[in-house]
Image: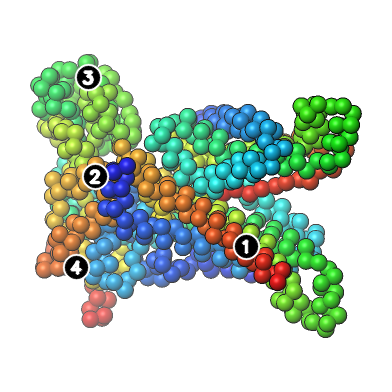
Amino acid sequence: MTLFMNYFLQNAGYIWMQCVRHFLISFYGVMIACIVCIPLGIYLARRIKLSTIFISLANILQTIPSLALLSILMIFLGLGVNTVIATVFFYSLLPILKNTITAIREVDTNLIDVAKGMGMTNQQILFKVELPLSLSIIMAGIRNAIVIAIGVTAIGTFIGAGGLGDIISRGINVTNGSVIIWAGALPTAFMAVMLDYLLSVIEKKLLVFIHH
Amino acid sequence: MVRKISKYLMLLLLITGCSFPGLGKNVSENGIVIASGNTTERQILSEIVSQMIMHYIPSANTSLINNLGSTLLIVQSLEKEYANISGAMYTGTSLTGELGLASTTDPKEAMKGVVEGYANQYDSIWFPSYGFENTYAFMVTKDIADKYQLINVSDLEKVKDKIRVGVDNAWIKRQGDGYEQFKTIYGFELEHINSMEIGLVYNAVYANKMDVVLGYSTDGRIASYDLVLLVDDKKLFPPYETSPVVTKKILRIYPELETILLKLEGEISSGQMQELNRQSDDEHLEPYTVAKNFLEENNYFESKNVVPLVDRTLYKALIQDVLPLVKEKQ
Amino acid sequence: MFNYLSELGVIVFDKMAEHLFIASIALVMGIVVALPIAILLANKKKLAQFAISICTILQTIPSLALLAIMVPLFGIGILPAVIALFIYSLLPILRNTVLGMRSIDPSLIDAAKGMGMSEKQIIIQVQMSLALPVIMAGIRLSAVYVIGWTTLASFIGAGGIGDLIFSGLANFDIPLIILGTLSVTTMALFVDLMLGKLEKRLAPRTSSKKIGGMSNG
């Protein structure tokens, strides 16, 4: 325990740097997936056949083990951080796309009819009715994606991307590296659990916001 | 629809070509990217190079590709332009490895071989050595050394059928200075030879699971386990000097890199490297922290003056195509 | 050339066998532990919720981190890998079993009570048999994820297909990387497909909702 605290204090700057880097890599991947998937999901929501194709494609993608997808993408995109961001992007597709489609579909059609009756344009319906009502479910998808992303980013160390995975893999390579392993693994686990919790709070807030 | 999908694919290609705030720049945007390995020594040296560059060129947005599994992968990352600097390359490994040249026991000749080879084959400058040699060495515990009266590698002959020998996986099949060459030069075979990961040999000999192991001479565990290195009396192993390697392309963009890296020339002795490795392996300081402490102690070599490469006979001809641009910039 | 290919074939086959071995031990352990717990807790709402939340938190821990944490505790090799994979396999099975058993129409349970069935009989003959497809869906999900995660187990010395991928990554050996990823992905998709078929076959005439789930890579 004292060893652990020692390691932590002596290398605090470095661990913090890797934490930030780890978060940023995950965040960028999920953010790009949001930019792509939310509009795509809105477009697909009313096109049942097409959306089934997309969802099953994303489902297959999800079945590919992360190390495998990362290595395959490495062949095309090279070593380093961008390949990890691309991998995170691919794993974020399913949760965000699926939740966006479901959310938009589940908006009460009566409400849309009312909105139409009030003379709202399609665009107004989307931004003032459909999207606000879907926010909570879409957020749940993003939350899921972020948790997956933190895990994928940890593996990114194997193609040289940095992040907390660097600390973990050094701990494994060094003799008697238990302390280093803990120092890398605990923040990684903590980051995933904390983000999951924080986003669940936001998710609930969004739900409340709709009901008022 | 097809147009839409292709638009998204374009976007994906775009993101791989650009860089994100906080994560350093890519090679394609003239960023300085350092390829680092998965050994403690490579990581420390790469961190030293990285922090030196950050200190002198803060605007350059330096980043590291860490944990690359082999010299081969580091060479690939330079060749495919994922990185433009390697923090630590070893003359012996590269000479017989990717350059495919004959091995030599003359350090000067080895250095000349890699410097010229890298300039011609990889359009890169192999810098002068950090000042320490890292070579394969047979090592034993003090007890074993006393028990069998071991000083030189040739002393192993008299106990060749008794001792358990642990060696690096790669060494058995290695060209130039591998086991085949060992048999030719020393003239005997080792009866009980076991191959394992290089990182495990030190513990194996310390824990008495092996009597003699082949490891790297600068590993920090030699000091902490109090191991004795056997003298390579018949000169099997070529001297592995260690240097940074920089692509000419990035040298043209940041000519200051030359001075910065030359400040490190000859500044790390074998004993010092062992100590730095030990801090990281034993005291569990991160390579980043070890490098930072080392550079701060030496004040980033700010007052050190260097002899430019163009004034050295070995480099004079090779650096010509970098120089004119340097002058234009000035 | 042929020799090289056949040698490689043997290696791939060996690694696949190793991979499936590790994954199946973990999965079987997961079923043996999670299923009885879920059945016992299914009718105790609060306790079941508690067990599910704990498993959800465990599931949130990134796989590399959990595998790494096993090293100081259990050393390297197959044992720590199996324990980590076992922990991951718990949640989908536990959650699906609890939800599956709970989603059964209460009127059916009342009818069973009316027929004079004991609580034990109701659990086994009514709740479990009706929930079987949902439970199966949980096992299927676990199986697919465990096969995926086993790839990483190579990192702590457990072997499996991950060996091929890691070795490919270290030496920039592109054919080896492709071979490794193809074999592990095929394995995951194949198991998914087969268990999916089994799941459909188990479906009784009454419709029951399929409960999916996601997890980190």
Q: Nearer the viewer, residue A161 or C26?
A: C26
How far is disc 2 from disc 3 in space, using C-alphas?
32 Å
Q: How is the image coloured?
A: rainbow
- For the residues beneath circles 4 and 1, the answer to whether they share a chain is no
Please name whichever residue, B27 or C194, is drawn nearer the observer in this view of the structure.
Answer: C194
Residue C73 falls in image quadrant:
top left
Find residue A154 and report its horizontal and vertical position in percent.
46, 51
Q: Chain of mark 3?
A: B
Residue C6 at least partly seen: no
The crowd level at tag 1 (other Cα within 10 Å; few <14, some 14-19, many 20+) is: many
User: Badge 3 is on which residue?
Assistant: B163
Residue C166 position within the rendered picture, expressed as x and y whole percent measured from the top left? 46, 42
Q: Residue at x 72, y 68 (%)?
A: A211
The residue pinned by badge 1 equals: A203
Label drawn at residue B283: 2
Name the subunit of mark 4. B
Question: Disc 1 sits on a residue from what chain?
Answer: A
The answer to whether one can see residue B274 in this image is yes
Residue sitting at x 60%, y 38%: C89
Q: Chain of mark 2?
A: B
